[in-house]
Image (spheres, helix red, strand yellow):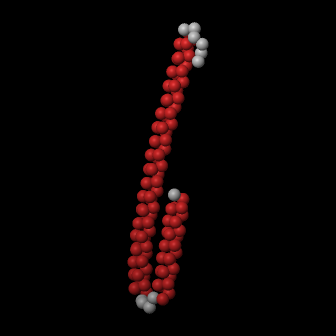
Amino acid sequence: MDNNESELGSFLAGFVIGALVGAATALILAPQSGAATRQQIASSSQDFRQSADTYAREYRDKANTIISDTRNKAYNLTDQVQEQVRIVLDTGKDQSEQAASNLSNGEAPV
Protein backbone atom coordinates (compact mmCIF):
# COMPACT_ATOMS: atom_id res chain seq x y z
CA MET A 1 0.00 0.00 0.00
CA ASP A 2 2.79 2.45 0.91
CA ASN A 3 4.64 1.56 -2.30
CA ASN A 4 1.56 2.33 -4.42
CA GLU A 5 1.10 5.66 -2.63
CA SER A 6 4.77 6.49 -3.19
CA GLU A 7 4.54 5.63 -6.89
CA LEU A 8 1.39 7.71 -7.32
CA GLY A 9 2.94 10.62 -5.42
CA SER A 10 6.06 10.44 -7.59
CA PHE A 11 3.94 10.33 -10.72
CA LEU A 12 1.89 13.35 -9.65
CA ALA A 13 5.04 15.31 -8.74
CA GLY A 14 6.57 14.49 -12.13
CA PHE A 15 3.34 15.43 -13.86
CA VAL A 16 3.21 18.83 -12.14
CA ILE A 17 6.87 19.57 -12.79
CA GLY A 18 6.53 18.51 -16.43
CA ALA A 19 3.48 20.72 -16.88
CA LEU A 20 5.26 23.73 -15.40
CA VAL A 21 8.40 23.19 -17.48
CA GLY A 22 6.28 22.73 -20.60
CA ALA A 23 4.33 25.90 -19.92
CA ALA A 24 7.50 27.91 -19.29
CA THR A 25 9.09 26.57 -22.47
CA ALA A 26 6.00 27.42 -24.47
CA LEU A 27 6.05 30.99 -23.14
CA ILE A 28 9.72 31.48 -23.93
CA LEU A 29 9.61 29.99 -27.41
CA ALA A 30 6.16 31.20 -28.47
CA PRO A 31 6.29 33.26 -31.69
CA GLN A 32 2.76 34.55 -31.21
CA SER A 33 1.08 37.66 -29.87
CA GLY A 34 0.52 38.28 -26.18
CA ALA A 35 -3.24 37.74 -26.52
CA ALA A 36 -2.74 34.39 -28.23
CA THR A 37 -0.17 33.38 -25.62
CA ARG A 38 -2.54 34.32 -22.79
CA GLN A 39 -5.32 32.30 -24.43
CA GLN A 40 -2.99 29.33 -24.78
CA ILE A 41 -1.93 29.63 -21.13
CA ALA A 42 -5.56 29.78 -20.02
CA SER A 43 -6.38 26.71 -22.08
CA SER A 44 -3.34 24.83 -20.79
CA SER A 45 -4.10 25.71 -17.19
CA GLN A 46 -7.68 24.50 -17.62
CA ASP A 47 -6.43 21.22 -19.11
CA PHE A 48 -3.96 20.88 -16.25
CA ARG A 49 -6.67 21.54 -13.66
CA GLN A 50 -8.92 18.89 -15.22
CA SER A 51 -6.08 16.36 -15.26
CA ALA A 52 -5.20 17.14 -11.65
CA ASP A 53 -8.86 16.74 -10.64
CA THR A 54 -9.01 13.39 -12.42
CA TYR A 55 -5.88 12.10 -10.67
CA ALA A 56 -7.08 13.40 -7.31
CA ARG A 57 -10.44 11.67 -7.79
CA GLU A 58 -8.74 8.39 -8.71
CA TYR A 59 -6.40 8.63 -5.71
CA ARG A 60 -9.33 9.41 -3.38
CA ASP A 61 -11.30 6.44 -4.77
CA LYS A 62 -8.35 4.11 -4.22
CA ALA A 63 -7.91 5.43 -0.67
CA ASN A 64 -11.61 4.93 0.07
CA THR A 65 -11.42 1.36 -1.23
CA ILE A 66 -8.43 0.61 0.99
CA ILE A 67 -10.18 2.16 4.01
CA SER A 68 -13.34 0.16 3.35
CA ASP A 69 -11.42 -3.10 2.94
CA THR A 70 -9.45 -2.47 6.12
CA ARG A 71 -12.61 -1.65 8.06
CA ASN A 72 -14.29 -4.86 6.86
CA LYS A 73 -11.25 -6.93 7.84
CA ALA A 74 -11.25 -5.33 11.29
CA TYR A 75 -14.96 -6.11 11.77
CA ASN A 76 -14.42 -9.72 10.70
CA LEU A 77 -11.47 -10.09 13.04
CA THR A 78 -13.49 -8.63 15.91
CA ASP A 79 -16.29 -11.11 15.26
CA GLN A 80 -13.83 -14.00 15.22
CA VAL A 81 -12.22 -12.90 18.50
CA GLN A 82 -15.62 -12.48 20.16
CA GLU A 83 -16.64 -15.98 19.06
CA GLN A 84 -13.42 -17.47 20.44
CA VAL A 85 -13.95 -15.65 23.76
CA ARG A 86 -17.51 -17.03 23.95
CA ILE A 87 -16.22 -20.56 23.34
CA VAL A 88 -13.56 -20.22 26.05
CA LEU A 89 -16.06 -18.77 28.54
CA ASP A 90 -18.63 -21.48 27.81
CA THR A 91 -16.00 -24.19 28.18
CA GLY A 92 -14.79 -22.70 31.47
CA LYS A 93 -18.37 -22.42 32.74
CA ASP A 94 -19.13 -26.03 31.81
CA GLN A 95 -15.98 -27.27 33.50
CA SER A 96 -16.62 -25.28 36.67
CA GLU A 97 -20.21 -26.56 36.81
CA GLN A 98 -18.96 -30.12 36.34
CA ALA A 99 -16.36 -29.65 39.10
CA ALA A 100 -19.01 -28.21 41.45
CA SER A 101 -21.32 -31.12 40.66
CA ASN A 102 -18.54 -33.61 41.33
CA LEU A 103 -17.74 -31.96 44.66
CA SER A 104 -21.38 -31.92 45.75
CA ASN A 105 -21.66 -35.62 44.91
CA GLY A 106 -18.56 -36.41 46.94
CA GLU A 107 -16.45 -37.20 43.92
CA ALA A 108 -12.85 -36.11 43.61
CA PRO A 109 -12.26 -33.03 41.44
CA VAL A 110 -11.00 -33.83 37.97
Quarter of the image holding residue 100? top right
Q: Which residue corresponds to the image point at 39% horizontal and 77% vertical from the top-left? A: 43
- Looking at the image, the residue that sits furthest to the bottom is 31
- Percent x, y of residue 44: 42, 77
Q: Is residue 63 above or below residue 94?
A: below
Q: Which residue corresponds to the image point at 55% horizontal and 19% vertical from the top-left? A: 96
Counting labels gives 0
Nearest the viewer among 27 and 58 is 58
Question: Looking at the rendering, in which quadrant would you find the C terminus?
Answer: top right
- Percent x, y of residue 65: 43, 54
Quarter of the image holding residue 105? top right
Q: Which residue corresponds to the image point at 53% horizontal and 29% vertical from the top-left? A: 88
Q: Is residue 106 above or below residue 3?
A: above
- Percent x, y of residue 36: 40, 85
Q: Is residue 23 above or below residue 33?
A: above
Nearest the viewer among 57 and 28 is 57
- Percent x, y of residue 83: 48, 33
Q: Is residue 42 above or below residue 75?
A: below
